[in-house]
Every structure is written in C-alpha cells, then in structure tokens.
Image (cartoon, grey):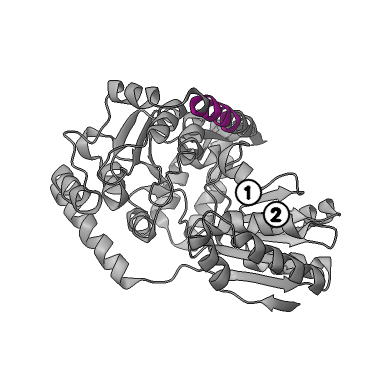
C-alpha cells in the first residue's frame, strides 16, 4: 500500500469533560423532571413553549405549511423504507423444533413496548432520520414511539421534520433537543412511557447521554462523525468519486473520507477533482476542513489489499466503483452499508432508497450492522417437554449440577425425575 494523502480516522475517545457535564444534567433531569427540561431548553435553544408536546392541530398546521411536492416526496421515501422493513421482518420467522422425543424448543420475536426516537437538527434539519427509526419500530410492532426533535433556535419546529415524524407513525411528538430529549424519553417524563430502546444520532453530548443511559434502556448504537470509503479501480470516473467523497464531507468538520484505488495516477486525478469541486461547493466551509484534516487517499497493490484496507477502516458507508463488483462484494466484511456500482450513492441510502441510514461509525462495523426492523425485536426462547423427557433430561442435569456443586439446582432436577418415574 502507498499512501498519497494522510488524514485522521475518528475513533471514540474518552472525553471526561463531556461525560461530567452530561452526568450532572441527567441527575438534574431525573430529579427535577420537566422543570429541568425547560431550564435546559431555554438555556441552549431559547425555547420554552407552554407545552413541549405538539397537539394534533399543531401537527396539521405544520404539514399545511409545506409545499405539496415535499409531502409527496417524503411519502415516496417513507414507502420505500417501510416496504424494505416489511421484507426484513418477513425473514424473521418463529422457530419450534423437537430436538429429541418429548423435548420441544423454540423462539419468538417479540417487539419492545416503547421506543424513544431522536431526530437531529443542528447544522442540518435531517428530517429523513424520522423514517429510519420510527418506521422499522412500527413495522416490528412497537406500540409506543415517542419522538423528539430540537427546535430551530428561538423559532420552534421545522415543518418538514414534523411531517416526517407524523407520517412515519410517531405516537407523540416533542420539540426538545439534546440531553433533555433523551432524559424525557428514558425517564418517562411528561407522562410518556419510559423507553425500552433509544434511537437517533446527534452531537457528542447526545452520544454521551446514550452511553450513560445504556443499561437502563437499550440503545441503537453510538454514532460518531459520518464516514465514507470508496474503492475505485482505474475504470472509475475520478470526478464522480470526488463528488461522492465531498457529499459526505459537508456533514461535519470531522467527517471521515477515504479513497482506496489501484494506481497513483487515479489517486492524483481524484485529488485534483476534489480540489476543483471544492472551489464551487456550496458547503465548502465545512467540507474543506473535513477533506484537509481527515481525507485519506491510498493505492492498493491488489484487490485483496484494497479489501484488507477497507475492512480495517470498517467504514459507515462503503462505495464500490469497480469492474469486478462480485469479487469485492463476496469478500468485504466490515461496513455499515454497501453501495455497489457508480449508479448508487450514499445520498440514496440516506434519503430515499429504503435501506437505513443509522449506521455504525468509528470502526463499530467490525461487530454490528445498522438499525433495522430486528433492532426492535427480542428473540426469546422457550422450552417444553413431556414427563418422560423430563425424566431423561433430569438425570443428566442432576449429575451435571453435582459436578458444578450447585446442589439446589440439582434438587430441582431430581424431584422431577422422582415425580415422573
């Protein structure tokens, strides 16, 4: 491997200052409830409405403000997400099997009762995130979805976000952001049922809040700055590759951008294209920092080395601009979502195509995938048996318990052997 351009790779790092701030806030929020929510909302967002929850009439009013094309396009995107989630659910079948005479084992997929969904605002009002957590939860059968989104500072809600949350199936919608939003959902403030799972991305304070609340409830995953890695051979289009790298660079100054190519000539052409496109990019201010600090360009000597580099990086988004797509697809193992061929791009997955955009970052793709309908289901096993089977299993169990010196366990087996013999 030859590195043409070096850059950082963002990993989760211990941030004691952020952890201390979030810990103090969560303690305050748990103790003082909605009074604390209001205090922080006023402080950070200049937002203190009579009620943080939107009424039905307010939701209708928000939707009425939108251009009909926005509503129609959102419906299309949500339909794609919903259809894919339903197809995923169809693969999750119950199981029941008789493993030996009289012994029946099985499992059921049971939805959690309540999900807390956070739709981020901040630099961009990412209303597309509404369908990514709410729709799979609803398709899974979750009864209660409480959704929160931050206000536009001093102004209130963003209509397109409210439309997306409502159409996705949120049962209750709150305009509150950051740590207070996660406290509201996790602690069950303002009369909402406490969340079983928290979903959604945000800034470092949001990520830390989810980390500290994990255990009290489940979380989807800890999401850091976004990432893209592109594997491109010499047949790829440098201008298109550069365009896709910059598509992610605009997210955040810490966005991760990596190109793995097969020749130094292609690497240099793509770097030149990035610089050319940056000069006229509307979001240059952010993208330029991301590219300068975190952009990586390297040349792999073979397809297998390109795969090894990508798997080590374990990107959130992985694009393949290569001729032999199947070779790479069959061998790559570490990525959040894979975009095969130049015809697709990360923005399709983020917004409209139907796969989920809540994905692992910071090398978490080594051990988890992204959010999907199965995230909201518990796979719970069960067992039942005949008296005759209980005798046979009981004899083995009692002997095993004695070896482990767990005598009370052994007695529970022994009494059944005696009862059914």
Point out residue 414 in the picture as x, y percentages from the top left corner.
Answer: 46, 45
As drawn, 146 above or below 37? above
User: Is 74 a magenta residue?
Assistant: yes
The part of the image, by quadrant, that contains residue 263 is bottom right
User: Is 295 a magenta residue?
Assistant: no
Point out residue 327 in the picture as x, y percentages from the top left corner.
Answer: 84, 56
Q: Earlier in the sequence, mark 2 or mark 1?
A: 2
The part of the image, by quadrant, that contains residue 144 is top left
Q: Which residues are magenta?
A: 70-82
- Image check: 207 left or right of 250? left
Residue at figure coordinates x 39%, y 25% from the top left: 63
Quadrant in which the N terminus is drawn: bottom right
**What label does residue 410 carry, if any?**
none
**What label does residue 319 carry, if any?**
2
Tag 2–tag 1 contact (CB < 8 Å): yes
**What label does residue 346 carry, if any?**
1
As drawn, 278 above or below 336? below
Residue at figure coordinates x 42%, y 49% from the top left: 219
Task: Give whichever of 119, 90 is nearer the camera.
Answer: 119
């Amino acid at each position: 491997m030859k590195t043409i351009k070096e850059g950082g790779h963002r990993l989760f790092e211990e941030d004691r200052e952020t952890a201390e701030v979030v810990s103090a806030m969560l303690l305050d929020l748990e103790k003082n409830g909605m009074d604390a929510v209001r205090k922080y909302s006023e402080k950070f967002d200049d937002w203190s409405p009579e009620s943080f929850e939107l009424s039905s009439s307010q939701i209708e009013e928000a939707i009425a403000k939108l251009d009909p094309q926005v509503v129609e396009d959102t419906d299309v995107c949500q339909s794609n997400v919903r259809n894919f989630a339903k197809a995923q659910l169809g693969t999750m079948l119950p199981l029941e099997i008789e493993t030996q005479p009289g012994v029946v084992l099985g499992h059921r997929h049971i939805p959690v009762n309540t999900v807390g969904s956070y739709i981020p605002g901040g630099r961009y009002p990412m209303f597309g995130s509404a369908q990514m957590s709410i729709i799979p939860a609803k398709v899974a059968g979750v009864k209660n979805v409480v959704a929160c989104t931050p206000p536009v500072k001093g102004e209130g809600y963003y209509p397109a976000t409210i439309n997306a949350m409502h159409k996705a199936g949120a049962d209750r919608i709150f305009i509150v952001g950051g740590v207070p939003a996660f406290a509201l959902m996790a602690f069950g403030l303002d009369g909402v049922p406490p969340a079983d799972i928290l979903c959604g991305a945000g800034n470092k304070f949001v990520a830390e809040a989810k980390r500290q609340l994990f255990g009290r409830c489940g979380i989807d995953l800890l999401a850091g700055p976004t990432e893209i890695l592109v594997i491109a051979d010499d047949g790829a289009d440098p201008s298109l590759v550069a365009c896709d790298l910059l598509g992610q660079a605009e997210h955040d100054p810490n966005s991760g951008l990596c190109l793995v190519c097969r020749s130094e000539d292609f690497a240099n052409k793509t770097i030149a294209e990035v610089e050319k496109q940056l000069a006229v990019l509307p979001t240059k201010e952010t993208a330029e920092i991301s590219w300068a600090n975190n952009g990586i360009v390297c040349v792999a000597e073979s397809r297998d080395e390109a795969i090894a580099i990508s798997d080590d990086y374990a990107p959130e988004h992985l694009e393949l601009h290569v001729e032999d797509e199947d070779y790479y697809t069959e061998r790559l193992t570490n990525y959040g979502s894979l975009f095969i061929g130049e015809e697709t791009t990360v923005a399709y997955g983020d917004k409209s195509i139907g796969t989920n955009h809540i994905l692992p970052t910071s090398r978490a793709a080594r051990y988890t995938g992204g959010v999907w309908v199965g995230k909201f289901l518990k796979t719970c096993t069960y067992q039942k048996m005949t008296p005759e089977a209980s005798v046979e299993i009981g004899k083995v169990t009692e002997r095993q318990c004695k070896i482990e010196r767990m005598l009370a366990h052994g007695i529970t087996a022994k009494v059944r052997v005696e009862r059914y013999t």
